[in-house]
Image: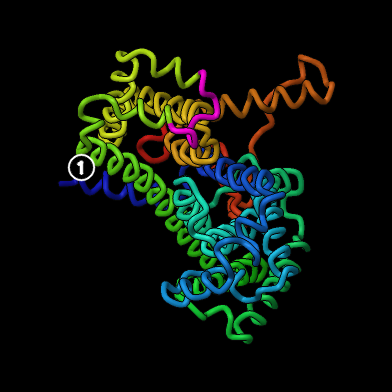
C-alpha cells in the first residue's frame, strides 16, 4: 500500500511541480500558428470571397446562423469593410507573433479570437483541417507554450529580473477593448464561453503580475501550481483529441465497404478537385497492390495508434508513418493546410530527445548563417529563471525539460 501511495504522491508532484512537455507544447504552438498564418497569406487576394461582407455566405446569412448557434465571431459586430480588414489583419499579426513566441500568453488569446472570428463567420470554408485548428486554438490558451523556442524565453534568459514595461501597457490596452466590447453589448451576444474565457485570462494576467511584484512566496507558489496543473491538463486534452481523431476516423473507415475491399484510396485520386498532379495520381493508382496496401495500412495505423502510446518504439514508428502519410496527402491530394494541421497535432507525441536535437541543429544552422564559422554553432542554452518562478508569458523553471513529461513524450 505504501508503494502505491508513494507512486501517487510522485505523480501529483510531477503534475503540480512543473509544466511538462515544454518542447512539445512549443512545437504545437509553432505548427498551428504557421498553418493558420500560411493559410491567411495564401488566401489574402481571396479574403473578400471567403470571409468578407460581399462573399457568397453573406453577412445576413452569417448573422442568422450565429443567432441560432451562439458561436463567437467578432466579424458579426459590424458589416463594414474597415472592420473586416482590421480583424483579418489582427489574425495575421497574432499568428506571426505567436509563431515567434512574442508575449505568447496574450498572442495565444488573440490567435484564438482570429481563428474563431474568421471560421465562424463562414463555416463552409475549410477542408477538415479547420476543425482541428478551431479546437487547438482554444487549447493553446491554457498552455505555457512559450517555455522554449520563443522570444519570451530569450528575453528572460538575456535580461533576468528586468522590469517588464510592455506587458502592463498591452494588458491595459486589451482591457479597454474588453470593456468597450462588453459595454456595447457585443461580447456576450452568443454563447458565453469565449467572452468569459477572455475576461478570465485578462484578470488572471493582472493578478499574476500583481503577485509577482508585491505578493509573498506563498501566493507565487500557489499561482505556479495552478498554472502547471492547467498547462498539463490542456496538454493532456491535446493528446486525447489527437487520439480521438485517429480512433474515430479509423473505426468509421472499417465500416465502409470501399475500405473493406481495399479500393477506397483509388477514388479520391481520380477526382479533379483532389488531383493537382494527375500524372502522380495515375502512378499511385496504377498498381492494385499499392492501392490495397495504402488503404489497409491507413486504417491499421489510425486504429492502432492510440493503443501504442505506452510503447515508445512502436509509437514512434507509427507517428513517423502518420506524418509521412499527411505529407503525401498534402502533395498528392492538394490538401496542404489539412496536412499541416494534422502534423502539428501529431507533434505533441514527438520524443523530447528528438526535439532537443532538432533545436540544436536549428541553432547551429542559425549560427552558420550569421557567419560565425563552423566551430561556433553550439546550441543556445534554454532560458532559466534564476528566481525559480514563471511569468504569465510562459517561462518555466525547468526549460530544459529535465523533468520527465507525460507518457508519449519520451524517446
239 lies above or below 84:
above
Tell me the quarter of the image containing the C terminus.
Answer: top left
Percent position (x, y) of residue 382?
64, 37
Crowd rating for badge 1 (residues with CA inside 10 Å; few <14, some 14–19, many 20+): few
| Horizontal side of residue 154 vs 324, given as left or right | right
Quadrant position of residue 317: top left
- Above or below 55: residue 240: above
Position of 371 with respect to 405 (left or right) is right
Q: Nearer the viewer, residue 221 or 116?
A: 116
| Left or right, 149 with reference to 89 | left
Percent of width and height locating residue 98 = 64, 50
Q: 150 or 9: nearer the eye?
A: 150
Residue at (63%, 26%) from the top-left corner? 360
The verdict on residue 181 being magenta is no
Visible residue check, residue 411: no
Nearest the viewer among 110 and 232 is 110
Q: Which residues are magenta?
A: 271-279
Determine the residue positioned at 48% across, 25% down. Answer: 328
Question: Where does the image place residue 261, in percent across and percent down from the top left?
Answer: 21, 26
Residue at 51% in and 80% down: 189
Secondary structure of the residue carrying numbered label 1: helix
Describe residue 254's horizontal placement relative to residue 121 as left or right. left
Residue matched to label 1: 3
Amino acid at each position: 500500500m505504501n508503494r502505491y501511495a508513494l507512486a501517487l504522491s510522485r505523480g501529483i508532484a510531477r503534475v503540480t511541480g512543473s509544466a511538462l512537455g515544454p518542447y512539445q507544447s512549443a512545437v504545437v504552438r509553432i505548427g498551428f500558428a504557421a498553418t493558420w498564418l500560411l493559410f491567411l497569406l495564401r488566401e489574402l487576394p481571396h479574403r473578400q470571397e471567403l470571409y468578407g461582407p460581399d462573399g457568397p455566405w453573406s453577412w445576413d446569412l452569417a448573422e442568422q446562423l450565429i443567432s441560432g448557434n451562439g458561436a463567437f465571431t467578432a466579424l458579426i459586430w459590424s458589416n463594414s469593410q474597415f472592420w473586416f480588414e482590421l480583424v483579418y489583419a489582427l489574425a495575421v499579426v497574432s499568428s506571426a507573433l505567436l509563431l515567434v513566441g512574442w508575449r505568447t500568453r496574450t498572442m495565444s488569446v488573440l490567435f484564438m479570437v482570429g481563428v474563431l472570428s474568421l471560421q465562424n463567420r463562414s463555416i463552409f470554408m475549410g477542408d477538415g483541417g479547420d476543425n482541428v485548428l478551431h479546437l487547438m486554438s482554444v487549447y493553446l490558451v491554457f498552455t505555457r507554450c512559450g517555455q522554449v523556442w520563443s522570444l519570451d524565453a530569450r528575453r528572460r534568459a538575456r535580461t533576468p529580473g528586468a522590469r517588464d514595461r510592455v506587458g502592463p501597457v498591452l494588458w491595459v490596452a486589451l482591457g479597454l477593448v474588453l470593456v468597450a466590447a462588453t459595454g456595447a453589448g457585443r461580447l456576450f451576444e452568443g454563447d458565453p464561453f469565449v467572452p468569459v474565457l477572455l475576461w478570465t485570462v485578462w484578470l488572471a494576467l493582472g493578478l499574476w503580475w500583481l503577485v509577482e511584484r508585491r505578493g509573498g512566496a506563498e501566493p507565487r507558489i500557489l499561482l505556479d501550481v495552478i498554472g502547471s496543473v492547467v498547462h498539463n491538463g490542456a496538454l493532456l486534452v491535446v493528446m486525447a483529441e489527437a487520439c480521438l481523431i485517429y480512433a474515430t476516423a479509423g473505426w468509421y473507415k472499417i465500416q465502409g465497404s470501399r475500405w473493406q475491399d481495399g479500393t477506397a484510396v483509388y477514388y479520391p485520386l481520380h477526382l479533379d478537385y483532389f488531383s493537382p498532379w494527375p500524372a502522380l495520381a495515375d502512378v499511385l493508382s496504377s498498381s492494385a497492390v499499392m492501392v490495397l496496401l495504402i488503404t489497409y495500412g491507413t486504417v491499421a495505423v489510425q486504429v492502432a495508434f492510440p493503443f501504442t502510446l505506452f510503447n515508445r518504439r512502436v509509437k514512434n514508428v507509427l507517428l513517423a508513418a502518420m506524418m509521412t502519410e499527411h505529407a503525401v496527402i498534402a502533395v498528392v491530394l492538394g490538401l496542404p493546410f489539412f496536412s499541416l494541421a494534422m502534423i502539428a497535432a501529431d507533434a505533441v507525441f514527438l520524443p523530447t530527445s528528438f526535439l532537443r536535437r532538432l533545436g540544436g541543429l536549428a541553432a547551429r544552422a542559425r549560427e552558420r548563417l550569421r557567419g560565425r564559422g563552423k566551430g561556433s554553432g553550439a546550441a543556445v542554452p534554454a532560458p532559466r529563471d534564476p528566481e525559480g518562478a514563471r511569468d504569465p508569458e510562459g517561462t518555466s523553471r525547468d526549460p530544459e525539460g529535465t523533468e520527465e513529461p507525460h507518457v508519449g513524450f519520451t524517446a
